[in-house]
Image: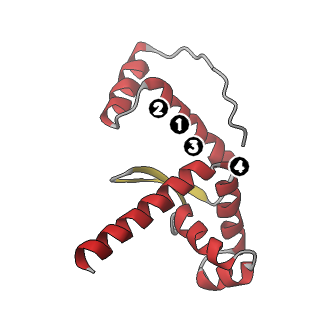
């Protein structure tokens, strides 16, 4: 996915504008960032049949429908790559197509997924230092 951005302008009713601004503010986002996230999730829904978004204490994240987060799959994929058989065995309850979509999603949005992997690694390091 290209890092180049463009601007889209849309008109919405005052009611929708007010509700969206409140919704985004409650999540620490401005209207532009919030609308961009909505559009990206819509686009992902069209192009990735197995991907959904889940809320968490740290924000929304991409996941396999009724399955693990994409970042979790990618963490293991890095260990198994290029051996898809190892990844498929590790996540034996998921369809191979869902695992492939997780990798494709990562290739489209590496920054988002890498940030979650890094956050998990930092938390693991904190736990090891604290509880060793």
Position above or below: 127 against 104: below
Left or right position of 83 against 28? right
Mark 4 and mark 2 in contact? Answer it, CB < 8 Å: no
Q: What SS does tag 1 mark?
A: helix
The earlier-in-sequence mark between 2 and 3 is 2
Q: What SS does tag 2 mark?
A: helix
Which residue is disc 3 drawn over?
41
Position above or below: 6 against 94: above
Image mark count: 4
Mark 2 and mark 3 in contact? Answer it, CB < 8 Å: no
Q: What SS does tag 4 mark?
A: helix
Distance from the alpha carbon under mark 3 to that under mark 4: 10 Å
Which residue is disc 4 drawn over?
47
* Rendered-image quadrant of the C terminus: bottom left
- Mark 4 vs mark 2, foreground winner is 2
The earlier-in-sequence mark between 3 and 4 is 3
Position above or below: 7 against 3: above
Mark 1 and mark 3 in contact? Answer it, CB < 8 Å: yes
At label 1, counting other C-alpha atoms closer than 10 Å, the crowd grade (few under 14, some 14-19, many 20 or more) is few
The numbered disc on residue 38 is 1
Which residue is disc 2 drawn over?
34
The earlier-in-sequence mark between 4 and 2 is 2
Left or right position of 96 against 132? right
Distance from the alpha carbon under mark 1 to that under mark 4: 14 Å
Residue at 44 percent of width and 66 percent of height:
121
Q: What SS does tag 3 mark?
A: helix
Distance from the alpha carbon under mark 2 to that under mark 3: 11 Å
Residue at 63 percent of width and 60 percent of height:
50
Q: Nearer the viewer, residue 73 or 48?
A: 73
The earlier-in-sequence mark between 1 and 4 is 1
Q: Position of residue 16 (x, y in %)?
A: 42, 22
């Amino acid at each position: 996915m290209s890092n180049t951005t463009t601007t889209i302008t849309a008109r919405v009713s005052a009611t929708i504008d007010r509700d969206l601004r409140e919704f985004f503010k409650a999540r620490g986002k401005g209207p532009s960032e919030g609308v961009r996230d909505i559009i990206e999730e819509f686009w992902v829904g069209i192009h990735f049949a197995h991907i959904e978004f889940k809320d968490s204490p740290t924000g929304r994240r991409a996941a396999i429908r009724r399955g693990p987060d994409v970042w979790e799959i990618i963490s293991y994929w890095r260990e198994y790559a290029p051996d898809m058989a190892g990844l498929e065995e590790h996540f034996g309850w998921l369809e191979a197509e869902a695992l492939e979509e997780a990798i494709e999603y990562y290739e489209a949005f590496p920054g988002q997924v890498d940030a979650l992997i890094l956050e998990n690694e930092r938390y693991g390091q904190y736990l090891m230092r604290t509880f060793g």
